[in-house]
Amino acid sequence: MPTAVTYLFLVVAIAAEVVATTALARSESFTRLWPSVVTVVGYGVAFYFLSFPLRVLPTGVVYAVWSGLGIVFIAAIAWLVYGQKLDLPAILGLALIVAGVAVVNLFSKTVGH
């Protein structure tokens, strides 16, 4: 059975991946030093913390939560911080991703509630 620490590690992995991906967009193909450093370190932290939930949760579930929530948070940052536009279909698609993650975690027997 997963513990709160398992989900805390997953949250840290998601946060690190979001920071790394946001920095990657600013690294200009790894030609800018600090965004490049943040990208590499952020992905290292993300994968390190992602390895812990993989010990107790199914790989597909962990990856679905990690990537799905990462997509939503990165899109939100791009919209709020960088002014990138999201149209109605994009918003609906992101809402479906969140709904999918919620359904897997709340109702799937593979998570091991």
Image (tube, rainbow, N blue to C red):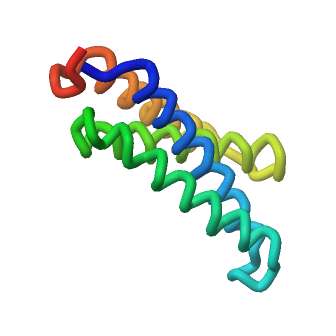
Q: Quadrant of the C terminus?
A: top left
Q: Is residue 17 above or below residue 104?
A: below
Q: Is residue 57 left or right of residue 95?
A: left
Q: Is residue 100 left or right of residue 23?
A: left
Report the residue at 43% width, 46% height from top. Answer: 50
Residue 79 position, x and y percent, is 75, 45
Report the residue at 83% width, 46% height from top. Answer: 81
Q: Quadrant of residue 41?
A: bottom right
Q: Nearer the viewer, residue 5 or 105?
A: 5
Q: Is residue 6 above or below residue 17?
A: above
Residue 62 position, x and y percent, is 34, 40
Q: Nearer the viewer, residue 98 or 61?
A: 61
Q: How many numbered marks have been drawn onto this rendered protein structure?
A: 0
Report the residue at 24% width, 19% height from top. Answer: 1
Q: Is residue 39 above or below residue 56?
A: below
Q: Is residue 35 left or right of residue 45?
A: right
Residue 91 position, x and y percent, is 58, 36
Q: Nearer the viewer, residue 9 or 64?
A: 9
Report the residue at 60% width, 37% height from top. Answer: 88
Residue 26 position, x and y percent, is 77, 68
Q: Residue furthest left?
A: 109
